[in-house]
Image: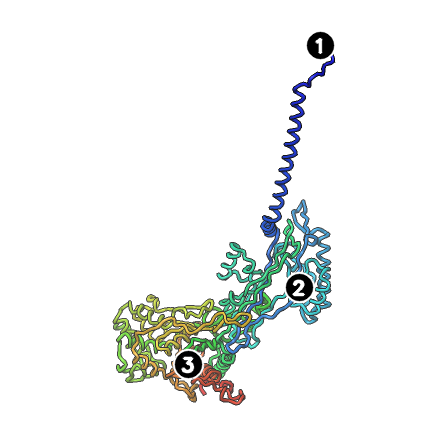
Amino acid sequence: MSFFRKQASPPDETNSKSSIGLRLNVFFFSTFVIFCVIIIRLAVLQFVEGPTLTEVETSRDTKNVPLASMRGVIYAAEGEKLAYSTPVQSLYITLNKEYTAKQTDKITGKTTLTPEAKAKSDALAAKLVADFNKYGDPKAEKMTEEDVIDALDLYFRKSLGFMARRIKADLTTQEVAYFMEHKGEYPGLEIVEESIRHYDKDTVAVQTIGYIKPFKSANSLNIYKNILNAMKNNPEPGLTYKDDEFVGFDGLELQYQRELRGQNGYQEISVNPQNMAEKVERVVPPVKGNDVWTTINKNIQMKTEQAIMDQIKWLHSNTVQGKTHPNALTGYAVAMEVDTGNIVSMASMPDYDTNIWTSGSLSTDVWNSIMDNYQNGTINPISSGTSGNGLRSVLLLGSTIKPLSVLVGLNEGLFTTSTYYSDRGFATFGKTGHETKVRNSGGHVYGSMDPARAIEKSSNAFMVDMIGKRLYDKYKSKGVDVWDKYMKEFGLGVSTGSGLPNEFLGQINYTNIEAAGSAQAALVYASFGQQGSYTVLQLAQYVATLANEGQRIKPQLVSKITDADGKVVKEFGREVIDEVTAFDKSYWKEIQQGMRSEVSAFSDFPYDFARKTGTSQQVAKGQIRDNGVFIAYAPRNNPKLAVAVVIPEGGFGSQSAAPVARKIFDAYDWEYGLDGVPKKSLQSGNNTNDPANEGTTTGTQ
């Protein structure tokens, strides 16, 4: 046996080496797999999920700041601008944390700017004021450093930190040039094009056109409450309103707010964790609003307004019913085309300059001067002007109801067109021994009369005996419902359909049986116009319905809407709201024959026309006041224009309201022609022949 034979390796050592190699191989393979997975995941993140993640990250770290659009124009019928916007350049500053850094006092808990932030903010304000004074309009009101600090809103009381602050609007050309050249010297400075609203200085139909207010002052209105809710639930950037954005608050400005506004643009701004702006990522420009074309003829409107003011002045110094009428301080008129429904004039006088609203706030003195006449008195009795004794624009109809009263009587078979009534100057109603007497105006006794003559002579006695009492005898207390149905078919006590905001539906008294004393009393007083108060627009629609023989059409204030390029977006035409077909043709002929009230203001009127005067009586300050009411349409057999005029405390309608109507008819005849031929087309460019321009004396000459 040899002691030098080679010794074999232990079995454990061989196994150990194999295990180490295997482990190394597994490690390297696993590392390779992990790196492959990481590389693949990075590729997926970059090329597949990258855009989505970027969008998510952007939406998380960006905010949308709206940019107001240019509001559309409101035109008169012939193209004059009644409300329009002009572009202006405004200076905005978007703050960073250097100007808004805060510190909190540990003892008082009060938060203030850090000394460094306050110093920088004060320096910025001082520099801006110096630049404004140097390059701004020397005639404009000067901004102070306090004004600038307030506009910067350093404590975020008005706006969030990332929102741009408007420091000054309506920059001069020199200011724009300077700030654009020195933009880098100011934090987040931008020059933004905005607009300023203007209204025709001639104050044309101002209450109908309406006015604007900042959005933050207008959100009490339902339309803006709905918009606020929509902004919360679906914050679409283009539909978001700015707090300082001007919006329609009354009239057509409000009615067509969505069309006039257009669509806001917006800036997409990246923000830091402190909610302060970093940079503008992108800008989406605003879309200009559409333009609204009204049916109001500026020339007719201005002549209507002037006629009312001239008549009020005349009533103060001339006698009607043996006395002057110093308490006649207001007047209202509406002229409506019978065939189209177009409103060619709508006047609530006195009026005012709507441009006072465009600054965003009113002084106490300015507010006090307009508070009684800033709303539309032709549709609304509230704040629509008052007479000397507080009577407003919505008054009892008086005798202007009588054509409809006779129609009701004829249609209900209470009498016929050939029935004759003996007028004794009065009529009585009520229980035997406790009768109430109703007299004709002035106590006149008219004798034998048919229904047409009863309208012409305005016989209260006929209305009481032949309509009020007989309607009660036929239906008893249900007669009130029958009467109400007829009134509403002719637009009295229901919406006219004009769409104007805050339109009053009228005051119906005949349904208050307790106040009237009995159903019979309610019907009796209603028959001659002492149980219903209606707006002047309702009166105009009512007389147009008489002219159309029972066809009630919608009053149209807008003819079309066009976009910024002049393309027609929407057109408006004749719309029938209601049609009464129950009346026999002979009934219409009877009332048309009766609408022949004697009116001296129309003594030389070249057209045969239908008319009815009225004097509604209402108690104010303990005394009975006479209010002038007048309705008419012309020509009688081919009606073109319907007119309604009301002069509170003006006395008899024939002497107070009718002269205003005459000037409206003359103005319409000049512009459009009551016979279809505009009289201005017959002149050789000499406007002095316009009959509506001849003199200012009115009344009962």
Q: Which sits earlier in the primary sequence, circle 1 or circle 3?
A: 1
Which of the two residues, 223 or 576, is positioned nearer the viewer here? 576
Residue 191 circle label: 2
Q: Looking at the rendered structure, which numbered label has been put on residue 337?
A: none
- Figure check: 110 above or below 558: above
Q: Earlier in the sequence, mark 2 or mark 3?
A: 2
* Label 3 SS: loop
**Residue 651 rendering spot, x and y as whole percentages:** 43, 79
Residue at the location (55% across, 67% down)?
289
Residue 23 position, x and y percent, is 64, 29
Quadrant location, the N terminus: top right
How far apart in space, not on screen, are marks 1 and 2 (Cα)?
A: 109 Å
Q: Residue at the location (50% across, 78% down)? A: 297
**Mark positioned earlier in the residue sequence (1 or 2):** 1
Q: SS for tag 2?
A: strand
Q: Nearer the viewer, mark 1 or mark 3?
A: 1
Residue designated by label 3: 640
Quadrant position of residue 522: bottom left
Look at the image and tell me whether residue 131 can be seen: yes
Q: Which residue is mark 1?
A: 1
Give the structural element (helix, strand or loop) at label 1. Answer: loop
